[in-house]
Image (spheres, rainbow, N blue to C red):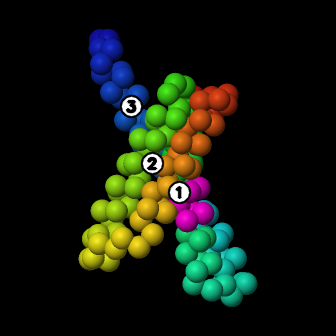
Amino acid sequence: MRRSKKAVQRTDRLITAGLSVLSGIGALTIAALLLSLLASFCDLSDSAVKGMSGIALAAGCFACSFCTANRRRRNGLLSGFFCGVAVFCGMLILGAFTVRIFSAAGIFTKLIIIVTASALGGFKGVNTRPVFKE
């Protein structure tokens, strides 16, 4: 029995979302591990470690939006922007649960880093050959 066009599109969207989340988490984890290894060997200050966490966050957002835009092959900046907003909201909610207070320190900077890296990932994902084939 054939599946309807809506069912196929829904399945494709779920697969795309799952792949992009997994690639974003993987890139974030690898970047955080490498940067923490660098920080431990070089004995860096706390402010340098905070900057490195921003770099790791940007790498994860870039990978997430790159994967999404590469699979969809259209609207790269828009899909990257929405990936960035979703990551920012998730980070904000997770931070509220783990820290138990709302901290406005650095939130605007994180928003700029996330949205910029995600938009660049979406732009790059659309303009490269398909890596994540169906």
The answer to which image quadrant residue 103 occupies is: bottom left
Looking at the image, is mark 2 or mark 3 earlier in the sequence? 3
| Pointer 1 local density, CA inside 10 Å: few below 14, some 14–19, many at least 20 | some
Query: Of helix, strand and loop, which one carries label 3?
Result: helix
Q: Position of residue 128 (x, y in %)?
A: 67, 31
Residue under label 1, please give it.
Answer: 113
Tag 3 or tag 1, which sits nearer the N-term?
Answer: 3
Residue at image position (40%, 55%) is: 88
Residue plotted at (45% across, 48% down): 84
Name the N-terminal-most of marks 2 and 1. 2
> Residue shown at 44%/62% (left/top)?
108
Q: Is residue 121 magenta?
A: no
- Please give the range of residues in magenta: 54-59
Which residue is identified by label 2? 84
Disc 3 marks which residue? 13
82 or 8, which is in the foreground? 82
Q: Position of residue 28 (x, y in %)?
A: 54, 60
Q: Nearer the viewer, residue 129 or 8?
A: 129
24 horizontally vs 5: left or right: right
Mark 2: which amino acid?
Gly
Position of 14 compared to 36: left or right? left
Identify which amino acid the numbered label 3 is placed on: Arg
Q: Main secondary structure of the magenta part?
A: helix
The reply to whether callout 2 and callout 1 are in contact (CB within 8 Å) is no
Q: Quadrant of residue 13?
A: top left
Marks 2/1: CA–CA distance:
9 Å
Asked whether the viewer can see residue 111, the reply is yes
Q: Circle 1 sits in a helix, a strand or a loop, which is it?
A: helix
Q: Residues within 10 Å of mark 2 (few under 14, many from 20)?
A: many
Could you tell me residue 14's position as x and y percent? 37, 35
